Image: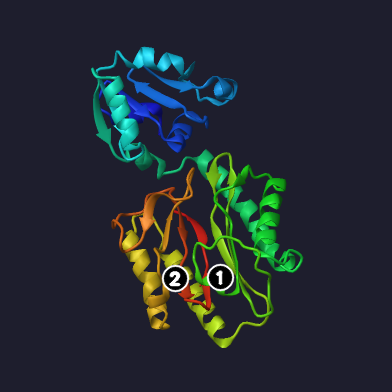
Amino acid sequence: MSLCDIRNSIHTEAFLVSHPANIQYLTGVNADGSLLLMRSHGCTLFVYALEEEIAKKNVQKGVCVRLMPAFEKIFKNIRSCGIESDRISIETFMNWKRKYKNTKFVRYVGIIERFRRQKSPKELQNIRFALSITEQLLSDVAKQMKRFPTEKELAWMLECQARELGADGMAFESIVAFGSNTSRPHHRPTDRRLKKGDIVQVDIGARYKGYCADRSEVYFAAKPTSLQQRIYDAVREAKEEAKAAVKFGVMTHTLDQIARKVLRKHGFEKYFCHGLGHGVGLEIHEGVSISSKGPDIPLLKNEVITIEPGVYIPGKFGIRLEDMVFV
């Protein structure tokens, strides 16, 4: 993908990019409050003075960096401009319309995100490195969870270790849950202490050069009960069967149905309360949604997705296993 590919997809005099992940994808720059103006003769990234030095250092070839005060001077002469209508607030849109009365704004939805689904070799390299850090973190949990006996302490240890291993930070707020807290898929770490017999759910991801990883594993503080083992085995089977079906062109509903069929066979489908997975890249959730409730679309070559079936028994425990898959 090149900037030319994006420009050729747009039929207005200019296109204004405001979503940070899209700006980073197109320019290599992650700068707060920046705007990217794309026109047929070139692209200009407008940044605030605090971000100018780092922007000029990281910007991709072919993109000019200018300070934000120059934006209004240039933009007022543009007669038609495409915007990311799904990425800006109504307030921002109305403010632009009031300010630039002579500009016709044309709304586009997901135009850059469609290009972002297929990763370049460099993007894949960054994601794989983020994933390798995440795998190292998960491999250490069983040893560390007794040394860091609360959810918050274990989460903090993992986040510190991620940076020591080369991560820029975490891709999302780490999910560390003990015991009955595991029945809540998006539980936030608390001061709850580890108890004998607890299930431990860890859902984490490192971020490297802006790119995300996303993995989830389950650990047992003692020998699992018969029910815990049955659910763990069912979830693992659902995950592996869905992963085995991942390939270029497979439909998202097909993958979701494969996992649900396995859980149905074991009597646990009604406890699976979310989609099977999602796309991953500069954002932890991007591109495709692998769910029977979402659009049924084919996977693309070089897309990166997650497969994450789960079973959650309210008030008791939950088990979710998540892998990343490179199509």
> SS of the residue at dot 1?
helix
Residue bearing the label numbered 1: 181
Q: Nearer the viewer, residue 301 or 213?
A: 213
* Residue that extends furthest to the bottom in the rendered view of this protein: 226
Would you call the spot at circle 1 few (<14 residues within 10 Å), some (14-19), or many (20 or more)?
Answer: many
Q: Position of residue 152 (x, y in %)?
A: 66, 60
- Of the residues under marks 2 and 1, which one precedes in the sequence? 1
Q: Measured along the vertical axis of the image, is residue 94 above or below residue 323?
A: above
Q: Identify the residue shown where x is 47% and y is 70%.
A: 310
Q: Nearer the viewer, residue 71 or 228?
A: 71
Q: Nearer the viewer, residue 30 or 72?
A: 72
* Residue type pointed to by label 1: Asn
Residue 241's disc number: 2
Q: Image quadrant of residue 198?
A: bottom right
> SS of the residue at dot 2?
helix
Q: Is residue 60 left or right of residue 92?
A: right
Q: Is residue 82 left or right of residue 224?
A: left
Q: Which of the two marks, 2 or 1, is nearer to us in this view?
A: 1
Q: Position of residue 220 (x, y in %)?
A: 64, 75
* Residue that extends furthest to the right in the rendered view of this protein: 147
Q: Position of residue 319 (x, y in %)?
A: 52, 72
Q: Measured along the vertical axis of the image, is residue 224 above or below residue 1?
A: below
Q: Position of residue 244 (x, y in %)?
A: 44, 66
Q: Identify the residue shown where x is 30% and y is 62%.
A: 293
Give the distance between the C-alpha atoms of the residues marked 2 and 1, in whole angstroms.
27 Å
Q: Identify the residue shown where x is 31% and y is 25%.
A: 96
Q: Measured along the vertical axis of the image, is residue 219 above or below residue 78?
A: below
* Residue type pointed to by label 2: Glu
Which colour assignment does the render follow? Answer: rainbow
Residue 149's disc number: none
Q: Nearer the viewer, residue 21 or 235?
A: 21
- Quadrant in which the N terminus appears: top left
